[in-house]
Amino acid sequence: MASTETVYQSNFKKGAYPFFENLRKQQPVFPLSEQFQQTTWLITKYEDVKELLKSQSFIKDMSKLSPSTTNETDGVSAIFQNMMLDADPPDHTRLRKLVQPYFNPKSIKQLESRISEITEDLIQEMKSKSGPVDLVDDFAFPLPIIVICELLGVPSKDRNKFRKWSNTIIAAADEFEEDFIGDVEAFLAYLKELFDERRASPGDDLISSLLQAEEEGEQLSRNELYSMMVLLIIAGHETTVNLIANTMLALFENPEELEKLKADPSLVPSAIEEGLRYYSPVDFSTARWAEEDLTFKGHTIKRGDTVLASLSSANRDEEKFENADQFNITRTPNSHVAFGYGIHFCLGAPLARLEGKVGIEKLLEAFPNIKLNSEQPEWRPVFLLRGLDHLFVDLK
């Protein structure tokens, strides 16, 4: 039986956009909840979201608010206390610099031929199936997980393990599950064994590079190494799974735009950007905290208050985007914030865009008559992300 939290999240996903529209008009800086005399604020307007994401008054490292909190812990908690996503400069700058060369546009461009090969293999597998195909399980998930595994130097045969571990970790942001500790411990044990193999036999991959940085000591601690791997494996595929599936859903829901794209495949990059805006793969930024009492858009935000940016709301802001609730694959300009903004702008954005472009191009080329199956798709009941559990399609 689905939990109350799961049902709530599922229902919220369905009605989120009208809710965000009302907040933008009535309370764009909204006190979402209050607990232990601390408020969680939700920011919904485009310009306000950008200002929040670039502000130095809000921090990502919560330990700065509690002197007793330390980053020297071990075990399960350590991987969440040493993550680049939750670090401030100079630690964030140091950690990002270690992996940035692998994700810059020039490096990513070199992966295009391999991404094409993986995509074509997945398409051949789909062609061999009879009946409806799940575009999430059979295409949108395996494409980015295979790519990130190869980039990191992880055997792609283990990709389904990562999917389970990833789902557990992401779901824990909403509701602590009984198997959370077990899954994270299994993840860490897997990484330890993999690290031992790479130390014995280094390769031309990101894991080998990070292990070298760890051995040099000052660049990367042991806990930071584990945190980096968890982040790269999870973030390295979750966003792209949602980008591909969400964009395809929007195309199915807007058949005139789908036909326009089939007639002119050169519009795929523009369609990707509109998919990112219209059904943003990440609904909310990860949390930030006010380091000191401050005023933001006329509201008093106290030290320790949590602030969340709604990327999905910002991307539907009618003051920024004309006909914001319409899906238009020729929209220009399209300066959405689906990948965030400021120093925490998504490291993997070039890779996600390329995987989305190659994937959707080849999918429509191979299956020009692809259409949504009668089974209604459902949004995953996860607070931070906007993604589909399944997307069943007919290929012929």
Image: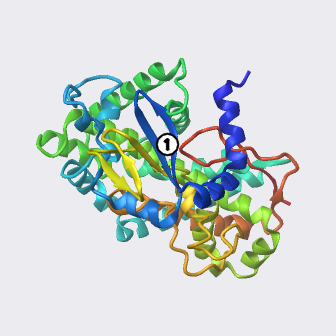
- In which quarter of the view is residue 315 placed? bottom right
User: Left or right of 58: which side holds 124?
Assistant: right
Residue at position x 40%, y 22% in the image = 185
* Residue 315 can be seen, yes or no: yes
Residue at position x 36%, y 32% in the image = 191
Residue at position x 54%, y 17% in the image = 178
> What secondary structure is marked by label 1?
helix
Residue, disc 1: 156
Crowd around label 1: few <14 · some 14–19 · many ≥20 (10 Å): some
User: In the displayed structure, would residue 35 be above or below residue 229?
Assistant: above
Q: Quadrant of the C terminus?
A: bottom right
Q: Quadrant of the N terminus?
A: top right
* Viewer-proximal residue among 290 and 109: 290
User: Left or right of 354: which side holds 16?
Assistant: right
User: In the displayed structure, would residue 50 be above or below residue 140?
Assistant: below
Residue 221: percent from left, percent from top = 19, 37
Residue 354: percent from left, percent from top = 51, 66
User: In the displayed structure, would residue 347 be above or below residue 196?
Assistant: below
* Residue 347 can be seen, yes or no: no
Residue at position x 81%, y 74% in the image = 256
Amino acid type of the residue that numbered disc 1 sits on in the rendered structure: Ser
User: Left or right of 247: which side holds 108?
Assistant: left
